[in-house]
């Protein structure tokens, strides 16, 4: 009898865990606490464009506007996360876990639509090369990673593994200059898609 009761309680406990709502944290891009490596490119706060919270940040100057403009690594482009124009945010997480990262961005072409993300001074592979192909000249939520197979990015590959509940630092750094960045969302629900 005792065993049956214990088994029943275990089933209840499992179902409670399974039914727990996912955790999510939303942050405005303009609420960064510091900016570093900003001598070549820097993030400026702008108002307008219908941005959430009334403001967004843009990586300036934007010298590579089209594919024909010269690509200069370490200046108007960086494939090395943390190299250029690094923004840091204090984010309080309700629980540890894998948080899928979504960013709301506004791009105009093919040379202002990428960024890198990191956590606690680290730049994991799952935060590299966030990429937007859809939604030109409109704020667009996306969570895709540019890969060799798909330059427009693959969904489900961008996340940050948060080691504990409480305060952690989230980072973004430049991949392409001119990038406009409104806000970001971290959610433990892999199926969640923010509404643009
Ligand atoms: Ca650019
Ligand atoms: Ca904003």
Image (tube, grey):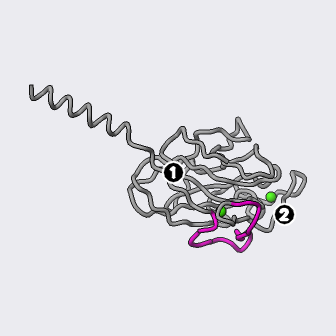
154 or 184: nearer the viewer: 184
> Which secondary structure, mark 1?
strand
- Mark 1 vs 2, N-terminal side: 2
Residue 8, placed above or below residue 49: above
Mark 1 vs mark 2, CA separation in Å: 30 Å
Bounds of the magenta span? Answer: 29-51
What residue lies at 67% left-to-right and 48% top-to-bottom?
A: 196
Q: Is residue 36 magenta?
A: yes
- Counting from the top left corner in percent of width and height, residue 122 is at 52, 58
* Res. 88 image quadrant: bottom right
Q: Which residue is mark 1?
A: 160
- Counting from the top left corner in percent of width and height, residue 84 is at 68, 65
* Res. 26 image quadrant: bottom right
- Counting from the top left corner in percent of width and height, residue 43 is at 70, 68
Q: Is disc 2's CB within 8 Å of ligand 1?
A: yes
What residue lies at 61% left-to-right and 60% top-to-bottom?
A: 172
What residue lies at 23% left-to-right and 33% top-to-bottom?
A: 10
* Res. 144 image quadrant: top right
Q: Residues within 10 Å of mark 2 (few under 14, many from 20)?
A: some
Does residue 58 appear to the left or right of 164 in the view shown?
right
Work out which residue is located at the far right of the displayed protein and give it: 68
Residue 43, placed above or below residue 117: below
Q: Which residue is mark 2?
A: 63
């Amino acid at each position: 009898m005792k065993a049956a009761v214990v088994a029943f309680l275990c089933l209840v406990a499992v179902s409670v865990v399974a039914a727990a709502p996912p955790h999510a944290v939303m942050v405005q891009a303009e609420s960064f606490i510091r900016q570093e490596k900003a001598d070549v490119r820097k993030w400026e706060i702008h108002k307008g464009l219908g941005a959430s919270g009334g403001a967004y940040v843009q990586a300036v100057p934007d010298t590579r506007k089209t594919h024909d403009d010269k690509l200069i690594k370490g200046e108007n482009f960086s494939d090395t996360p943390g190299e250029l124009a690094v923004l840091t945010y204090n984010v309080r997480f309700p629980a540890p876990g894998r948080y899928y990262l979504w960013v709301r961005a506004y791009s105009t072409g093919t040379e202002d639509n990428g960024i890198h993300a990191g956590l606690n001074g680290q730049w994991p592979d799952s935060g590299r090369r966030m990429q937007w192909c859809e939604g030109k000249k409109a704020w667009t939520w996306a969570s895709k990673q540019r890969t060799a197979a798909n330059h427009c990015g693959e969904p489900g590959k961008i996340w940050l593994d948060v080691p504990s509940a409480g305060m952690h630092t989230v980072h973004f750094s430049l991949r392409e200059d001119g990038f406009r960045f409104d806000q970001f969302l971290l959610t433990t629900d892999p199926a969640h898609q923010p509404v643009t």
